[in-house]
Image (spheres, rainbow, N blue to C red):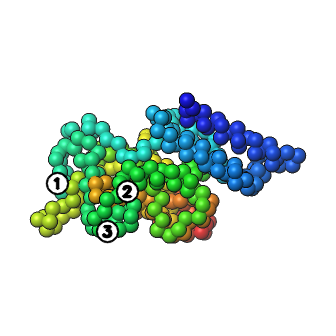
Amino acid sequence: MADQHGIFLRLCHIRDTEEQVHGKGKGKGKAAVQDVRLSAGVQKLRDSLLGQMYLDQRFETVHFYHQDARSFPIGKVLFQGQPIALAKKNTFDAAHWQKQKKPGWYFGTWPPTCAEDIVGFVDDKHVCFSCKQQEVCECDYELWMDGMQLEMVKTVRLSEVGPGEYGCFARRDIDWYENLGEYTGELRPLKQGRKSLADTQYSAHIMMGPPRPKSVKSGGQAKCNVDATHRGSLFRWLNHSCNANARLSWGRVGMNRRVLVVEAMQPILEGMEITLDYGQEWFKGKHKCWCKSVFCKNPAQPRTTVQA
C-alpha cells in the first residue's frame, strides 16, 4: 500500500522528469523550468496524486508539504522541528476542558465532552456554506467537508515566503466572496489560549454551544479557540496583511455543524498570496508589521520605503 511519502516521491520523479525534458540543452537550470506550462496530462496526474497525498482515507496521519511555483511538493513543513498534521475537521480533547469554569453566555452542558457539544449547533440566521441558503436545509457536513478538502488542494498551494516561512498562494483565479474552505484545528478554551505572539497567530475564534435562547433578550455568545498550532487545515499558514484579500467568516453547513471558513474579499489572481488581517491588537508595542502595504498600521520600515 502506498503511503503519503511514497506519493511524494512519485511526484518528485514527475517534477524531475519535466525539468530534464524542458531544461535539456538550455543551461538555465530549474528556475527557467518554472515558466514552462505543464501538459494537460501531467497537470491532471499531478493534481490526482496531490489529492491522494492529502485525502487518502487509509493514511493514519497526513503531514503538510511545501510546494514550488508549479505546485509540486518539495519537502515536509516543520514547526519547532516537528511536522504539522492535517486536521480535516476540528479535533477535541476533553482533558483541556475539565477544569475550566463555564463561560458566560454558554447555554449547553458543561464541561463539553466532544466537538459536537461545541460546534454541533447552528444559528438559523447564518447562511449554509453548502447550499448558500439561509432557510432550513438538509446539507451534510461530511460530504461538504470532503468536497472542500479536494477543492482546497486544487485551489491553494503552500509555498515559502522566506527561509523556513510559508504562505498560501492561489493556484487559480479566485472570485470575490468565494468560499475557499474551513479553518480547522483543536477546539480549546479561550483561557488556555497561548500568550506569546509567535503561538497565537495560529488560533481563531468560533462561537460555541447552542445559540442564545430567544428568552434571553440580550447578551452575546461564548467563544473558544480553533487552535491550529500543531494540527489544522492548510489555512493555518495564512499570513497577515493590513490590506488583506481574505477573511474568516462564521456560518454553518446543514443544521448541525457550525464552521469557520476562509472567504475571498476581492478577486485573487493566480499566483497571488492569500492573506488575512489579524486585527488591530496583533501588532502593538515592539512587534512591527512586515506586510509592506501602503495601508500598513504598524510598519517595520519607514513609510517612504513601504510598497503597495
Q: Helix, strand, or loop for circle 3?
A: loop
Instruction: Provide the residue designation for mark 1.
Output: 107
Q: Quadrant of residue 139?
A: bottom left
Q: Helix, strand, or loop for circle 2?
A: strand
Residue pushed farthest right?
25
Q: Is residue 229 left or right of residue 303?
A: left
Q: Quadrant of residue 256?
A: bottom left
- Dividing the image into 4 quarters, which one contains the N terminus? top right
Query: Tag 1: Cα neighbours inside 10 Å, few (<14), some, or many (≥20)?
Result: some
Q: CA distance from mark 1 to mark 2?
A: 20 Å
Q: Is residue 138 left or right of residue 113?
A: right
How many marks do you count on the picture? 3
Residue pushed farthest front?
138
Task: Give the amino acid type for the residue marked by disc 3 in the picture.
Answer: Gln
Q: CA distance from mark 3 to mark 1?
A: 23 Å
Nearest to N terminus: mark 3 or mark 1: 1
Residue drawn at (78%, 52%), measured in percent from left and top?
A: 32
Q: Helix, strand, or loop for circle 1?
A: loop
Q: Are marks 2 and 3 in contact (CB under 8 Å)?
A: no
The mark found on residue 260 in the picture is 2
Q: Camera-side residue: 97 or 48?
A: 48
Instruction: Provide the residue designation for mark 3.
Output: 134
Residue drawn at (23%, 53%), measured in percent from left and top?
A: 209
